[in-house]
Image (cartoon, helix red, strand yellow):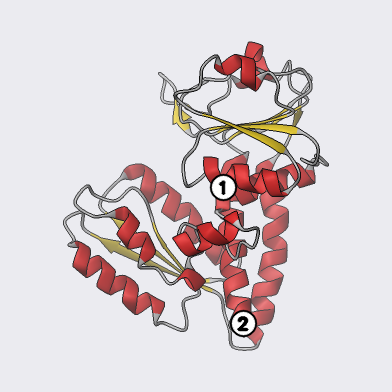
Amino acid sequence: MTAQIIDGAALARSLRTGFKQRAESLAARGHRPGLAVIIVGENPASKVYVRNKLKACEEAGFHSLLIERPAGISQTDLLTLLAGLNADDAIHGVLVQLPLPAHIDAHRVIEAIDPAKDVDGFHVANAGALMTGLPAFPPCTPAGVMEMLKSAGISPEGRHAVVMGRSNIVGKPMAMLLLQAGATVTICHSKTVDLGAITRQADILVAAVGRTKLVTPNMVKRGACVIDVGMNRDANGKLCGDVDFAGVADVAGWITPVPGGVGPMTIAMLLSNTLKSAESHV
């Protein structure tokens, strides 16, 4: 293997140490950072994600509130719940774990969160702020990727960055952050023709598609930085990403592992956004 591994787990631990110190400083002045997490239904993956977020909050000295509701909850009741959290001065961040049951309009739910407490960065007000270069709360996963590039000493300025995926959660905001950092950005998606011809041009390749080992060594430019955002399960149930790690690591200059790469950084950036919200209320 020639690629240097960008250890997201180690970077997240380092950042969280600083977050804890800032949280303790706030708490000493009577302003303990507070995060409320709503989970609807019994999705096993969602429960794991939520458990990890709450554990990180506890370790960082945050106040966390877990609100569990059955899959049959009405949209009206969910919106009423959000209104109460918006008005709660002890809560600085509110997130609703996705996906939601089919009968609930996820967009309407996200838009019901106070933008000043939208620590996921999904509200259209925060998405618009990101577009104009003034993000209050950048979406956590793309923000985590930018921190990983910084930690590895990789400046996007003047580089060709290729983002695989166009979701509102990762792909689009990832492209905007890279663009703002001075990269020339190409977005690829399911309709892209000759995908490999484009990915081989990338100095920075971000894979956020959700397809197991989609990125193979022949799709990667030698020496490129490959960021794997994917969280998938292979045929044996083993956690893996969108990148063929073993093969691509022989071609890339830098690579992120799954697990232990982008995942821990996503949670770290959630804490960062919540802390920023709490500090703004002091």
From where the camera sits, is residue 52 visible?
A: yes
From the image, tell me which residue sits under label 2: 27
Residue sitting nearer the eye, 139 or 263: 139
**Pointer 1 or 2: first along the chain:** 2
The quadrant of the picture occupied by the C terminus is bottom right
Residue that appears at 68% across and 44% down = 179
| Residue lying at the far top of the rendered structure | 218
Rendering coords of residue 162 (x, y %): 64, 30
List x then y, in percent, for residue 159.
77, 34
Instruction: Give the vertical position of 275 relative to 102 (above or below).
Output: below
Q: Secondary structure at mark 1?
A: helix
Q: Quadrant of the N terminus?
A: top right
Residue 264 in view, yes or no: no
Q: Which residue appears at 42% of the width and 54% of the height?
A: 50
- For disc 1, the neighbor class at 10 Å (few under 14, some 14 to 19, many from 20) is many
Tell me the residue that label 1 is attached to.
173
